Image (cartoon, grey):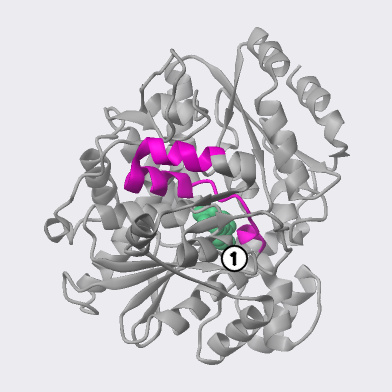
Amino acid sequence: MNIFTQTRINDCVCDKKVDFEEVILNPGTSSRGLYTLENIPSVDFASIINYDYLELTKYIFRALNIDPESNTLEEALQCYKKFDNPLNPAPLVKIKENLYAQELYHGPTRAFKDMALQPFGVIFSKLANKKHKKYLILTATSGDTGPATLESFANRDNIFVVCLYPKGGTSDVQALQMTTQNAKNLKILGIEGNFDDAQSTLKSLLNDEGFKNTLEKKQIYLSAANSVNFGRIAFQIIYHIWGYLNLVKNNQINFGEEIFIVIPSGNFGNALGAFYAKMMGLPIKKIIVASNPNDILTQFIHTGIYNIQNKALIKSLSPAMDILRSSNIERVLFALFGAKRTTEWMNNLENTSCYKLTPHEHSLLQSYFLATSCDDKECLQTIKETFNIGYLSDPHTATGIKAAQELCHQTPAIICSTAEWSKFAPTVAKAILGKNLCDKEAIELLNQQAHIQIHSSINDLFSKPIIHTQTLDKDEIKSSILDWLK
Ligand SMILES: *Cc1c(COP(=O)(O)O)cnc(C)c1O
């Protein structure tokens, strides 16, 4: 089993390097950095072109030396049976010449978070059972992580999940995906406030020693399933490789030909997966980072300066990418420049809200990444134009399509399609029909006027009973959780 290191220098005496199981169950580090792999191996992709999704996952996990014991991975990947096509959970769809969407949203909650959270849930629960421990998993969501986490952990032994979401801050479909969950081990709490309030409440609970001690007296341990957990990242490497190998299998490219991978990015988990694939030797010319009006990642890749001084978060039409501090970029910095530099930069970010690469460092970063941003007007226009040539995209995917059109030219490109349109129906209806509608009306009208089919899991939401109705103030959350666990 591979041993994980930390992205930041750890001057605490308890410097411990830990294995994958520990990283999954307890993602918090002693250095305030992230657990990460020390080395990324190179892989002979030509020899594995014909592997199926399970064989590919096993092969890559083995290459990274993070293969969990016995048949855990086989069991975990059974989750893809819940996807539209179990044999191809992440299919490619051709948009036009040289431009493909890899649809990562064919799982139960219709966003790409299922690709990793579904198998992650199985592995996490197996490990908890093996250790005879109970876990409380806390999560905060702006809309997609919450439903995917709940779906993954529903009815699992020894696991409780509390999900905090900003009341009124998600789409109706996203809210219903959470509030209609009826498994006994799940608790969904609306928070008065925005996503930042939900996130900061989560952080203060995770760091609350009193809360932790009270839980441990009940033999319950606190954990998080957020997107920095390497147990999720590992599964996000696989589909990028799968996409490339499928282009080869379908004779769209020759093996070895370089392609672009275009990624609508927020917390950079999806892009990190592609970065590792490129480090392993997958023929990726560049990873193209698509931003929305919150273009901090694009600015960083363009200038080598990460500067959030005087920056405020903008609410955009692609809310899952509304971000200022993008966590997983730290693992890229570690992989390219080591722990010492990463620690300096992260300290600078904490102290001055800014850090800078040298010109030499910046050019190394640019050898992996290109970037561009997309404002809301361009997003709506892209949805409409793409629909007119026969492809329906959600607002996040649209930022990727816009980026590909700007930067890819004659080179084949795979755009990660991160959500189904149905999760953001009002925006899609505005783009295509020019109307302002609520989720249900938008879905119905798109179905009638544009003949767009709706997946049953989304349609059924509107007739399910709502189980979770509680909305609380930030300071009522802790006692509410403890009450529930009684
Ligand atoms: C989470 C999410 C993203 C951003 O992914 P990161 O891995 O955080 O960069 C983009 N689009 C959708 C629809 C998402 O749910």
- Answer yes or no: is residue 444 visible: yes
Q: Quadrant of ligand 1?
A: bottom right
Give the vertical position of 238 relative to 93 (above or below).
above
> Of helix, strand and loop, which mostly describes the magenta segment?
helix
**Residue 213: image location, x then y, percent:** 67, 11
* Residue in the image at 34% along x and 33% along y: 72
Quarter holding residue 85: bottom left
103 or 166, which is in the foreground?
A: 166
450 or 389, which is in the foreground?
A: 389
**Residue 433: image location, x then y, percent:** 72, 87
The magenta segment = 319-347
- Answer yes or no: is residue 108 visible: no
- In the image, taking residue 423 as reference, residue 88 lies left or right, namely left
Give the vertical position of 298 relative to 78 (above or below).
below
**Residue 358: image location, x then y, percent:** 40, 55
Task: Identify the amino acid type marked 1.
Answer: Asp
Q: Is residue 336 magenta?
A: yes
Q: Which residue is mark 1?
A: 295
* Residue in the image at 46% along x and 35% along y: 34
Quarter holding residue 215: top right
Name the quadrant of the C terminus: top right
